[in-house]
Amino acid sequence: MISVIMANRMLRFLLTIAYIVSFTSTFADDTFQYVLGIHGYDPATVTDLTTSSKIKLPEPYCAYVNITGINNMPTTKTQNLHAWLEFYDGEGSCFKKRVTLNTQGNSSLQFIKKNISVKFYEEAWDEGETTDIAFGNWIKQDAFHLKAYYNDFFRGCGKIAYDIYDDITSDREKPLPWQRAEVATASGKAMCHPNGFPCYVYLNDKFYGLFVWSLKKSHKNMGQEKDNPLHIHIDGTISDNALFDGSIDWSKFDVRTPNGLYCTKLETKQPGDMPSYKLYDGDHPTELIDDSMPYYDPNNEGHVLTNQVKRSLVSFSNYYAELKKVDEEHQDAGKFWTEYSRRYDIQGLIDYWVHSLVTNNYDGFWKNWQWFTYDGVKWFIEPYDLDATFGLHASGNLIFPPEWHNHLGVRYNQIPANASQTLLLKYFPNEVKERYIELREKGLIDAQRYISYFRAWMERIGTLGYELEYAKWPESPCIRETIVNPQWKMEDNWENINTYPAYSPTVTYHAGSKCTIANRIWTATVTTTGVQPYQQLGQIDSLERIEEWIRKRISLLDELFGYNPEPDDIKGLVSDEQTGIRKVMQNNRLYIIRNNEVFSVDGKRTR
């Protein structure tokens, strides 16, 4: 536990850029050798695992990595830079391996500090044996992601959001999707979403940045078999116009599992050769083949596999229309539950909703979610890329207030219009409410619990790490202010944002005119043309801000769902499981709690 003095020093440092800059002259050293020394690296006693092709280590509290053999980090997904990676776990174990590096992500590629994909090789780059590495209770992998979290002040809020998701699902009898699907071949370590630990990364012995060493998406972590046509995993833009409305835009998402699929693009052939289809490329996705196509070969196992996968995806795209018909014809909750649960994992969807409400996962309802199936019929959901949570916008340039994106209608209502969500909320709103209250009662949704996660994460990184990080990356949007041009005023809300026109440099704006740019509403204060509303975008974040945000967010959700936490001095005396009534004593007076409401013994509601 860090001292109070150190904690205060860290908070003061993290509040302003000026303070960050003032620390740059106090660094003892920003080299890899220095950080190894202060964390106990001793060549005489360290356990060197370099010669092992199978490595298993406890999850590091914080790791230290040095990348050599290249002059610059990768900037594209196709570079495949050949480098060496030296890893020290901070606890006396290390290894040095060949790695191939490229960038990872989509919208995050706009940032100067990029996510990095790392794949390990033993004797030669890009070929031969790869290294199996497992940390803690993670599934073993030969490739990982270094997540930059450039827009995130804490450099790890997404990892904390995954931990909260684990909290929310932990009390289920079968908390993991593959358990509910009864997949016998799944590894017990398959958690179906990433996890990570903090990592100082150096390039050629000089500090490069704080990253989160993270599990990547893989069939093993999803509990799937890579060649099973029933084990399908899709990733990307999964929305109404990409999939749910009954017509599929194959370019919007990647079919990650199974492997060995074929697409409708044709191989280049010599004149007279029989045309044949190309292997599917998830980096450039296009339509899968099926048995109606002219060059389909029923004797080709890959063609047969692809045909089966495509049939499942086409069926999936029609679920909304099918359920809408059930909704219109029957209006019966029991009938609808049967039809809905045959197609979707209701338990998982409810937990996903509750988690999204708690963390404000506003960006997780058209992309940044994982859809997958184990039988080609029933589809499951898990989160991914949770960097836009706890009020953070994906750009890092603004922070939404806790009232925004409550989804269920508190203030700024936004419900994605696809079958898995709108019909779920129409028929099962009480299940969402009851699940939230159940998790609150169990302490699995709790403000102080979540605040402790952020404090612990910052302690793992330490003051030195944040000092080095923000000296290296001083333009991070989460540590700089928005500077508004005097001709404009930035509004503090987003209500009706889609009703205002986008800013144009050719339009003359008069005092009171409104427009939108950079996800905000702006009001002109004078007549102006060609002056955009801001000089600089940013949002200074802090631990104090997120602590207040979490408390307010959960308080708002308590109000939304009618949850009234018991005072600390109420202790249960008698429980009647049949009626759900509890008799309690407070200040020597008897009260009755029914349906989470407190009544005096004469039946008057007290709060």
Image (cartoon, rainbow, N blue to C red):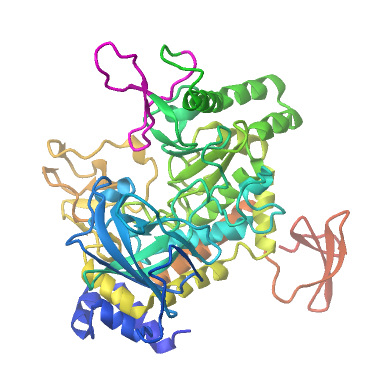
The front one of 101 and 157 is 101
Q: Nearer the viewer, residue 524 or 411?
A: 411
Q: Residue drawn at (38%, 29%), measured in percent from left and top? A: 279
Residue 535 lies, with reference to residue 335, above or below; the image says below
Residue 598 screen position, x and y as percent: 76, 62
Q: Is residue 319 visible?
A: yes
118 left or right, relative to 247: left
Q: Is residue 404 left or right of residue 486?
A: right
Please determine whether, in this image, residue 18 is positioned above or below residue 540: below
Query: From this viewpoint, is residue 396 visible?
Result: no
Please indicate whether residue 567 sits to the left or right of residue 355 in the image. right
Q: Position of residue 504 (x, y in %)?
A: 17, 38
Q: Considering only vertical position in the picture, is 341 above or below 519?
A: above
- In percent of width and height, residue 314 lies at 52, 24
Q: Position of residue 498 (x, y in %)?
A: 35, 37
Q: In the picture, which quadrant includes the C terminus?
A: bottom right
Quarter location, residue 263: top left
Task: Give the residue drawn at x 28%, y 76%.
Answer: 467
- Does the segment drawn in magenta span residue 268? yes
Per the rendered image, the range of residues in magenta is: 264-292
In screen coordinates, is 381 left or right of 603? left
